[in-house]
Structure formats: structure tokens, C-alpha cells
Image (spheres, grey):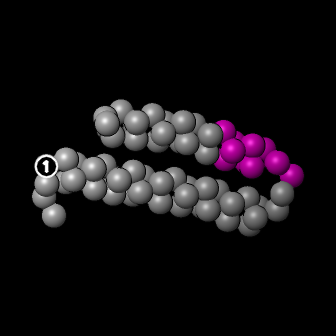
């Protein structure tokens, strides 16, 4: 399985969706503090997703080579 291709695609789709959501939050009528916290949460989710993709890629790469 090409984990780089799949992981990259998942990252790009998720990043696009998250940035669209951040744009909608920025244009909403919410209080500024709530907007800021929601934006931080969305960016934090993107960071967690990125770490998960790297972890998955590493696990598959090590398993394919019989390391670890």
C-alpha cells in the first residue's frame, strides 16, 4: 500500500475542509472568543491528524521491512 499517497490525499482533503470551516467560522456572528477557540480546535485537529498519518506511515513502513 502506498501510504504516502493515501496519507497525502487524506491530509489535503482534511486540510481543505478544515480551512473552509475556519473561513465559515470567521464570517459567522459568533463571539470573538468562541471563534478563536473553535479555530484553535480545528487547527489542533489538523495537527493530530498529521501526527496520526505519520505514525501510520511509520508503522506500515517498519512492518514491510520486518523492523521493530
Q: Secondary structure at mark 1?
A: helix
Task: Report which quarter residue 32 is drawn in.
Answer: bottom right
Residue 27 vs 68, above or below: the answer is above
Residue at x 41%, y 57% (from the top left corner) = 52
Horizontal side of 6 relative to 14 (left or right) equals: left
Horizontal side of 14 relative to 26 (left or right) equals: left
Horizontal side of 65 relative to 49 (left or right) equals: left
Residue 61 vs 47, above or below: the answer is above
Q: Which residues are magenta?
A: 20-29
Disc 1: which residue? 65
Q: Give percent across and percent down for residue 64.
A: 19, 47
Q: Give percent across and percent down for residue 49.
A: 48, 54
Residue 51 vs 9, above or below: the answer is below
In the depicted view, which residue is nearer to us: 43 or 53? Answer: 53
The N terminus - image quarter: top left
In the depicted view, which residue is nearer to us: 15 or 29? Answer: 15
In the depicted view, which residue is nearer to us: 33 or 20? Answer: 20
The secondary structure that dominates the magenta segment is: helix
Q: Give percent across and percent down for residue 3.
A: 33, 40
Any magenta on residue 22? yes
Circle 1 packing at 10 Å, graded few (<14), some (14-19), many (20+), is few
Horizontal side of 45 relative to 29 (left or right) equals: left
Task: Report which quarter residue 41 is drawn in.
Answer: bottom right
Report if residue 19 is visible in the image. no
Residue at x 61%, y 45% (from the top left corner) = 18
The C terminus - image quarter: bottom left
Report if residue 16 is visible in the image. yes
In the depicted view, which residue is nearer to us: 46 or 59? Answer: 59
Q: Give percent across and percent down for residue 50.
A: 42, 52
Amino acid at each position: 500500500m502506498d501510504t504516502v499517497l493515501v496519507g497525502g490525499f487524506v491530509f489535503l482533503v482534511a486540510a481543505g475542509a478544515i480551512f473552509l470551516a475556519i473561513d465559515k467560522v470567521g464570517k459567522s456572528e459568533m463571539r470573538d472568543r468562541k471563534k478563536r477557540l473553535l479555530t484553535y480546535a480545528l487547527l489542533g485537529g489538523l495537527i493530530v491528524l498529521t501526527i496520526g498519518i505519520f505514525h501510520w506511515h511509520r508503522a506500515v513502513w517498519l512492518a514491510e521491512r520486518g523492523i521493530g
